């Protein structure tokens, strides 16, 4: 499968996890990148990272430690 999702590069403060705009942008509910990849691998998937857009943070998310991760996962 192909996935495009937001992941955290570092934790964000609790008050931002409840921000409606960040929730709509898939940031407030995002998990750490390494945890995301680990969960896929623990579920039995092989993972290939296709693209990592860390500039999205500067463009859309006030410089928060997030990136758009695009990957391929297969069993």
Image (cartoon, rainbow, N blue to C red):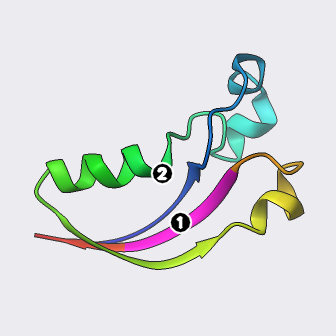
Quarter placement of the N terminus:
bottom left
The mark nearer the N terminus, 2 or 1, is: 2
> x and y percent of residue 66 in the render?
67, 52
Taking the image as shown, residue 35 lies to the left or right of residue 32, namely left
> x and y percent of residue 21 in the render?
80, 37
> x and y percent of residue 29 in the render?
57, 34
* Location of mark 2 (residue): 33
**37 and 19: which is toward the camera:** 37
Disc 2 secondary structure class: helix
* Location of mark 1 (residue): 69
Question: Pointer 1: residues within 10 angstroms few (<14), some, or many (20+)?
Answer: some
- Circles 2 and 1, Cβ within 8 Å, touching? The answer is yes
Taking the image as shown, residue 21 lies to the left or right of residue 10, namely right
In this picture, which residue range is highlighted in magenta?
Answer: 66-71
**3 and 9: which is toward the camera:** 9
Disc 1 secondary structure class: strand
Q: Which quadrant of the structure image shows residue 35?
A: top left
């Amino acid at each position: 499968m192909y996935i495009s999702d937001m992941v955290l590069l570092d934790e964000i403060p609790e008050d931002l996890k409840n921000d409606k705009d960040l929730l709509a942008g898939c940031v407030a509910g995002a998990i750490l990148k390494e945890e995301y990849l680990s969960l896929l691998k623990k579920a039995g998937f092989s993972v290939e990272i296709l693209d990592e857009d860390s500039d999205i943070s500067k463009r859309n998310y006030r410089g928060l430690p997030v990136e758009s991760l695009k990957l391929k996962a297969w069993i």
